[in-house]
Amino acid sequence: DKQEVVTTRNITYFNIDISDFLGLCQDETLRTSLKELATKCKYSDPVSIPETEEKEQQIKMELQELRAIIEQNEHEKANEKIKLILRLLSSRNRICEANK
């Protein structure tokens, strides 16, 4: 059981971060993009495997940058960052699927 908690931690933290971003953001267009990201993350395979570690680190870094961008109210830049994170998350999910 403990091993499973450790291996699902990344996706759990991604979901928490994205929820925080929704709380920070007032722009409706950006909120829509964040909700799409939240949904994609919510339905991602929660289990991390060694093969997904690199993508998860990239996602973590991009989420940190996204927080700063949102705090600076740079909505257009934030939308581009969300698109990048969605691509990284899709790639991570394909890796998970290929390793089942």
Image (spheres, rainbow, N blue to C red):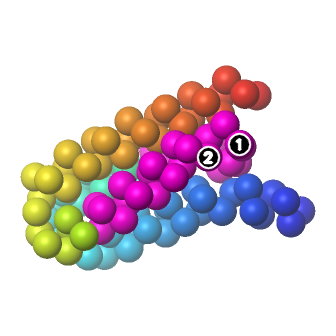
Q: Quadrant of the C terminus?
A: top right
Rendered location of residue 79, percent (x, y): 19, 50
Residue 59 badge: none
Name the side, left or right, on which 63 lies relative to 3. Answer: left
Residue 19 included in the magenta stretch of the image: no
Q: Label 1, on which residue?
A: 50
Q: Label 2, on which residue?
A: 53
* Vertical comparison of 27 with 35: above or below: below
Write the residue at 54% across / 49% down. 56
Amino acid type, residue under disc 2 in the picture: Glu
Residue 71 figure quarter: bottom left
Rendered location of residue 75, percent (x, y): 12, 59
| Viewer-side residue, 52 vs 83 | 52
Write the residue at 50% across / 62% down. 15
Q: Main secondary structure of the magenta part?
A: helix
Is label 2 in contact with label 1 (beta carbons under 8 Å)? yes
Write the residue at 73% across / 56% down. 7
Q: Is residue 29 visible?
A: no
